[in-house]
Image: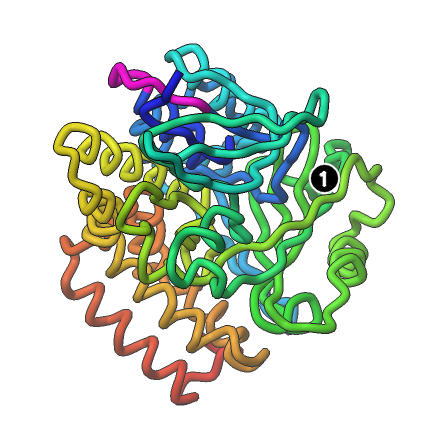
Amino acid sequence: MRFDAVVVGGGPAGATAAEDLARAGRTVALLDRMGRIKPCGGAIPPRLIEDFRIPDSQLVARVRCARMISPSGRRVDIHIEGGFVGMVDREHFDAFLRDRAVAAGAARVDGTFLAVERTADGPEVVYRDRGNGSVGRLACRFVIGADGARSDVARAEVPGGDRIPYVIAYHEIVRAPLDDPDYDPSRCDVVYDGRISPDFYGWMFPHGPTLSVGMGTGRDGVDLKHATADLRRAEGLERCETIRREGAPIPLKPLDRWDNGRDVVLAGDAAGVVAPSSGEGIYYAMVGGRVAATAVQSALATGRARDLALARRLFMKEHRTVFRVLRSMQDAYYRSDDRRERFVSLCHDIDVQRLTFEAYMNKRLVRARPMAHIRIGLKNLAHLLGIVSPVHT
């Protein structure tokens, strides 16, 4: 048969695109390699839970406090007023999303993407079957590339897809120290310290009975495993049982183009949609999958390949400003330990806390508090210029 679409990659972006297309009555194949688990803190905001109908059964923890830790060891707790951030384990969460896509009507194919080839009737996705090693073909009208930051689909099919910048993230899933009276299973810790990461951050995110401990960096020569061991040692987690270790690239910037103008469109990490500064990716990946499905739906209905460009336009229309603000914050504060110290000091401010979490929870900049924005701007300038001492703020 010839599918309306073949989705390459079964993470949150690909599974969402496949489910949306299947629910719309389109024939879709979801090509994915089983057994992969992406390293990820696993945080999902309330808007994701609501927009994508995530059941409580998928939440392994509910975070109600974020602790920011500076290079000097200063700790600032930011409490989430009247809500929580959900935590998921990607091993089970991604499988849930794939299963839901299949239940909606998508055909699951366990294989490794090799190429897109074209015949007189349209594109065919060539893949290697993971079961018997044979080469198979999936005929289709459109292809959605959702195969990660080092996307083979992007490199082969979309201009600029071979030049996406990224950081390498590494984490270890460890047994949570639930018997430790100082451990709070409803708090995530974020460590801004050049000794852990010279250009990003380290994290400790609760997953119920387990804990994700890791860091990321875009610098060459950094030993990620050693840095994570240092983080575990500093936080008293070195004796916790290690369950698994995972590493993967995380893109730093959305690509300038997400489609080839013909029959391929990108989604999720393949399109570069991870939030700067925070590295948050699950929500933006799922939105990316949804807008890719919308673009394919439009192209199927109109027969116009240029409609594939809708995916990027729809995404950036809603999220461009947030990405720009977060990029500016990362560029300003992640460059040195002195700047990181000032950033954590700024996080102590109640205006920053409230607006940051309102924006994070709802995924849009909050405009209802203009005076708070003005105060934050002035405080931010004072910290960057060194007018305010981070020790006494």
**Could you tell me residue 175's position as x and y percent?**
77, 34
**Could you tell me residue 319's position as x and y percent?**
26, 53
Task: Name the quarter where the N terminus is drawn.
Answer: top left
Q: Residue at x 21, y 66 (%)?
A: 373
Eyeballing the image, is 91 above or below 244? above
Most extreme residue toward the right is 239
Eyeballing the image, is 294 above or below 100? below
Q: Residue at x 33, y 34 (%)?
A: 120
- Helix, strand or loop status at disc 1: strand
59 is within the stretch colored magenta: no
The image quadrant that residue 291 belongs to is: top left
Residue named by callout 1: 173
Residue 68 visible in image: yes
For the residue pair 139 and 203, the one nearer the viewer reads as 139
The image quadrant that residue 90 belongs to is: top right
State how many labels appear.
1
Q: Give the side of residue 84 with respect to residue 89, left or right.
A: left
Q: Residue at x 72, y 21 (%)?
A: 132
**Could you tell me residue 258's position as x and y percent?**
33, 52
Magenta residues, as a range?
22-29
Q: Amino acid at mark 1?
A: Ile
27 is within the stretch colored magenta: yes
Task: Name the quarter where the C terminus is drawn.
Answer: bottom left
Q: Give the side of residue 110 with respect to residue 314, left or right.
A: right
